[in-house]
Amino acid sequence: MPVWQSEDVREADEAVLGVATTGISARLFLTPIAAIEHWAGRNPQASCVSAENLELSYEQVSQLTLLLAAEFRARGTEPGDRVVLELENGLGVVLSFLALNRLGAAAVIVSPRLSEFERQKIVSHALPVAIITAITAPSCDLMRPQLMTNVLAALGLVWSEDGAAAPLDRDKYPLAANVAAMIYTTGTTGEPKGVMLTHQNLMFTGFVSGKLRGLGEADRVLTALPLSHAFGLSAVLCSVLTQGASLELVVTFSAAGILARLRDSAITGFLGVPAMYTQLISADRDTALNYPFLRFLFSGGAPLDPTLKKTVEARFGLPLHNGYGLTESGPTIAQTRLYAPLSDTSVGFVIPGVDYQIVGASTSEDGIGELKVRGPNIMAGYYRNQAQTDQVLIDGWLATGDLARINGSGALEIVGRIKELVIKNGFNVYPPEVEAALLKLPEIIQAAVIGQAVPGNERIIAFVQTSASRLDLGWVNQQLRSTLAGYKLLDEIRVVDQLPSAPSGKILKHRLADLL
């Protein structure tokens, strides 16, 4: 495998981007809605987004978001306000996000699959003016004139001010400047943190990611990644919008459904988490089928297993590209390049315009240290949490909490996590949150939760001390459902007489990992 030097990568990137790294900012759309207006003027009938058996052109998205923004304004929405979008993938979440973008308000996008407990924590922290939920599918005649006087209803959405914050409370905690979206991440404390992503964060990530994937107006990208996560919102939706391409959104991932769409000549790219690719391979049993129109496949959101990568590449006849990032970094920090597919499972090279340093690597025998990054992709901070913002943002550098090194091919390799983080099906699961939920059960005396790597994914395993004669995994998960989302539930529970601990009482989780 050739060794890529940083200067070679920079020159190749600039050739792909069509602009010097120092000139990227000048090439960005100021906002996502500005990208919509640009393409609506240049190619109005071009497909912009499709979901739920409906497809909208750039011109139609422009018109509908104008009308929807007027509805939001009439309900009192002002610049800097937060509106919770409790929506699955679909036209509703895309158009609502863009309509709020027109008003200078921020979309707080949350998954409707959260438990009521998790949802309430986020809503009470975000201090929104309203919460938008879906009650029906969008109307098939969405663009009929008589429906366009009430776009919210035509989209099957409901605006509710139940649970909205009082005006004085909202004004007491203003957003940072130019925030387009807030994505909540639970964090190691178990408390929700609202990551404030600015227009620049989204547009920078969208532009660079889109260009590096070679996106153009002829491309149609397929994804089931939820827009309630930065990967879906920024690295997919905004990358499509910046390049005038088309996005096909899948509401619920189905391996059979995705495979059927990948055989369509319109689909040129797919983005997903490793767990999705594992399911695609399992479901793709007809080796006579091929996918001649696909141009790229990208994985992210979780570590990529080498065996899975080789299997996917052999089946689809394309490199499976990889990437890495955090919600706090908008999210992309690094990705492999179309011009430089790698045989390993590293995360490629840091994207152009972003600086990085691996702190402590020079004093480490294996070159491993904590990864820190800075650039136009870095969040404005955590909403209403200056203390934790100051812990991770120091002099413009974001401390990722991840351990990294530069491998033999010159690419970035993430080798571990300082934070106790499990990534299951592409979703972040923080053990302290699961442990806290377990300890609410009277049968649990002590609990320690760790992750176990399996091909393309991680499992959640709890070691517990209990007063019960036996514990049934199904029963425990049933109790946890009242406070935890489904992807945070346990895959295995192990009862032990005593959890290993230090004299201070701190549980020694590395000893538990040795038992796996």
Image (spheres, grey):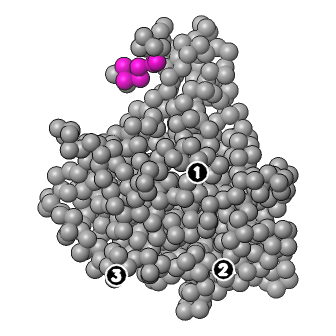
Position of residue 481 relative to residue 81, above or below, is: above
508 displayed left or right of 492: left
Mark closer to the observer (2, 3): 3
Residue at horizontal 67%, vertical 62%? Answer: 107
Reading the image, the residue beneath label 3 is 19
What's the CA distance linking mark 1 and mark 3? 32 Å
Position of residue 448 relative to residue 347, above or below, is: above
Residue at horizontal 82%, vertical 61%? Answer: 159
Reading the image, the residue beneath label 2 is 61
Residue at horizontal 56%, vertical 65%? Answer: 198
Q: Residue furthest bottom?
A: 42
Q: Residues within 10 Å of mark 1 (few under 14, many from 20)?
A: many
Of the residues shown, which amino acid type is indicated by label 2? Answer: Val
Mark closer to the observer (2, 1): 1
Task: Give the mark nearest the N terminus, 1 or 3.
Answer: 3
Reading the image, the residue beneath label 1 is 382
Give percent across and percent down for residue 388: 54, 43
The quarter of the picture where residue 354 lies is bottom left
Give percent across and percent down for residue 491: 51, 31
Q: Residues within 10 Å of mark 3 (few under 14, many from 20)?
A: some
What's the CA distance linking mark 2 and mark 1? 31 Å
Q: How many marks?
A: 3
Residue at horizontal 75%, vertical 53%? Answer: 172
Q: Residues within 10 Å of mark 2 (few under 14, many from 20)?
A: many
What segment carries the magenta color?
506-512
What is the quadrant of the N terminus in the image? bottom left
Q: Nearer the viewer, residue 406 or 239?
A: 406
Of the residues shown, which amino acid type is indicated by label 1? Answer: Tyr
Give percent across and percent down for residue 446: 55, 16
